[in-house]
Image (cartoon, rainbow, N blue to C red):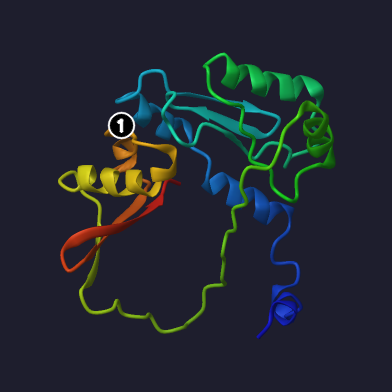
Amino acid sequence: MNASQSVSTPELRGFVDLNFARRLEMAETLSPMHVRALQRFWPDATSEVMAGGTAIFAGRTYPANHIVGMGLYGPVTLHDVERVEEFFRSRAVPCEIVVSPLVDPSLRDLLAPRGYRITEFNSVLTRRLDDSALVPPADGITIESVTADTQQIWDRVIARGFAEYGPLPENLFAAFATLSNSLNFLARVDGEPAGEAWEPS
């Protein structure tokens, strides 16, 4: 099936709307509980809700200091943008704004003349849950829930995934490893750590 056919499939029409976009963005947003967990290792970690989005700062080396969800709940004002800029720049990190294609147009109109530019695109793959049979892992691959005994290994595997940002300090993600509401997994290939999954919500 080619791309044009998949987009026009009747059962997918209307699947991604504003409410669904909000849910996807919330999945990437750290809650106050997650911020408190970060503060165990990084006391300066903090968050603030602005224009419907949540801005996160977890130290100058944290690779995801940004605001998510801004502009998905109505128009954005110049004052909103200035507050976001002050939140990050007062902490000596770049102001990064995650922009969904479904944001209110006012956000895009305000960012363009202020010199913002696109630095990356992120795609989220979704599927409806059905009765399809589960696919067993290939030989040699095991998947396990993260525990207190494996949280340091899990932390290091995630850090390797951010290698483009340079070396990251230890325990940058360990705070989330065993939170009660998190679903975190460690994958091994022939017993060696090889991948991870993290669902913070």
How many marks overall?
A: 1
Task: In the displayed orientation, state which residue is furthest to the top.
Answer: 90
Q: Which residue is drawn at 41% across and 33% down?
A: 33
Work out whether residue 171 or residue 94 is closer to the camera in this orientation and state it: 94
Asked where in the image residue 137 lies, by quadrant, the reply is bottom left
Q: Position of residue 24 (x, y in %)?
A: 59, 52
Q: In the rendered image of this protein, does residue 75 appear above or below residue 122?
A: above
Q: Position of residue 73 (x, y in %)?
A: 74, 39
Q: Residue at x 57, y 59 (%)?
A: 124
Helix, strand, or loop for circle 1? loop
Crowding near the residue tagged with mark 1, few <14, some 14–19, many ≥20 C-alpha atoms within 10 Å: few
Is 161 positioned to the left or the right of 141 in the image?
A: right
Q: In the rendered image of this protein, does residue 178 appear above or below residue 132?
A: above
Is 31 positioned to the left or the right of 18 in the image?
A: left
Q: Which residue is drawn at 41% across and 44% down?
A: 162
Q: In the rendered image of this protein, does residue 31 appear above or below residue 47?
A: below
Q: Which residue is drawn at 60% across and 58% down?
A: 123
Q: Position of residue 201 (x, y in %)?
A: 45, 46
Is 65 positioned to the left or the right of 158 in the image?
A: right
Q: Name the residue under label 1.
A: 169
Say which amino acid is labelled 1.
Pro
Identify the image quadrant of the N terminus: bottom right
Q: Position of residue 19 (x, y in %)?
A: 69, 53
Is 56 positioned to the left or the right of 98 in the image?
A: left
